[in-house]
Amino acid sequence: MVISVYADRRTHDVADIAGRLAHASAGLVGPVGGRVVLVGPRLLGNHSSGELVARSVLMESHRPQEVGPMLGDLAGRYAVGVVILSGAPNERVLAAFDASDRVLLLCDPSVASVRATQRAIKLCRSLGYGLDKTAVVLHDFAEDASLVPAEVAAALKCDIYWSIPGHEAGVEARDTSFTRLAERLIAPT
């Protein structure tokens, strides 16, 4: 399974969330089910789980036609691949979307992020991706945020797949949220 984690901005946040999702997935598939690979342009942070999370680099120099075969190869070797994608959608990002089983669109509680997520949803719909492929994941929402998840769902005109609590929720609550998100994503259908 290949899961792309995308936002058009805040690369560090995308890398952190993807890394934590890879770490949580590794805890679920373990050595028997295969390893997990984290794929990104720059692999920020250290969210490895021993030998269970490998790393691979998707560089700017990769041509769009190379991205699908690369991710397909990784999907054949690993139980779960988590891909870090950020920036304006380009041919490489779209090739990664096409090669992914799931595309998680990240949205934080800022108006700019909500607008960017609206554009990403519109793009995904124009590419023919359904609800089985794309999902909106909220992150860093707090009780004192200017927007609440229900307002974001209304603005996006779609359901929210998952909400990751902000750092003020504490490490344990965030880790539990990532584990439950990984369970939901990789559970057999």
Image: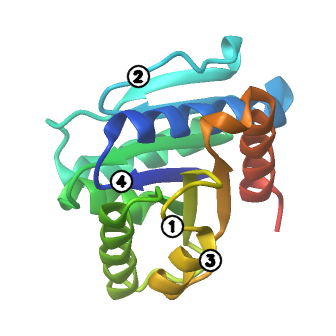
Q: Amino acid at mark 2?
A: Leu
Whether residue 101 can be seen here: no
Which residue carries the number 4 mark?
A: 68
**Is 136 placed above or below 9 here?**
below
Residue 155's disc number: none
Q: Label 1 neighbourhood size at 10 Å, few (<14), some (14-19), many (20+)? A: some
Q: Is residue 20 left or right of residue 63?
A: right
Give the SS element for disc 2.
loop
Is 187 in front, or is 108? 108
Is 95 in front, or is 106? 106
**Is 85 placed above or below 174 here?**
below
Which residue carries the number 3 mark?
A: 150
Query: Which corner quadrant holds the C terminus?
Result: bottom right
Q: Amino acid at mark 4?
A: Gly
Cα–Cα span, label 3 and label 1: 8 Å
Q: Decide: marks 2, 3 in contact (CB < 8 A)?
A: no
Which residue carries the number 1 mark?
A: 147
Which residue carries the number 2 mark?
A: 44
Q: Is residue 102 left or right of residue 6?
A: right
Cα–Cα span, label 2 and label 4: 23 Å
**Is 139 placed above or below 171 here?**
below
- Asked where in the image residue 39 lies, by quadrant, the reply is top left
Q: Decide: marks 1, 2 in contact (CB < 8 A)?
A: no
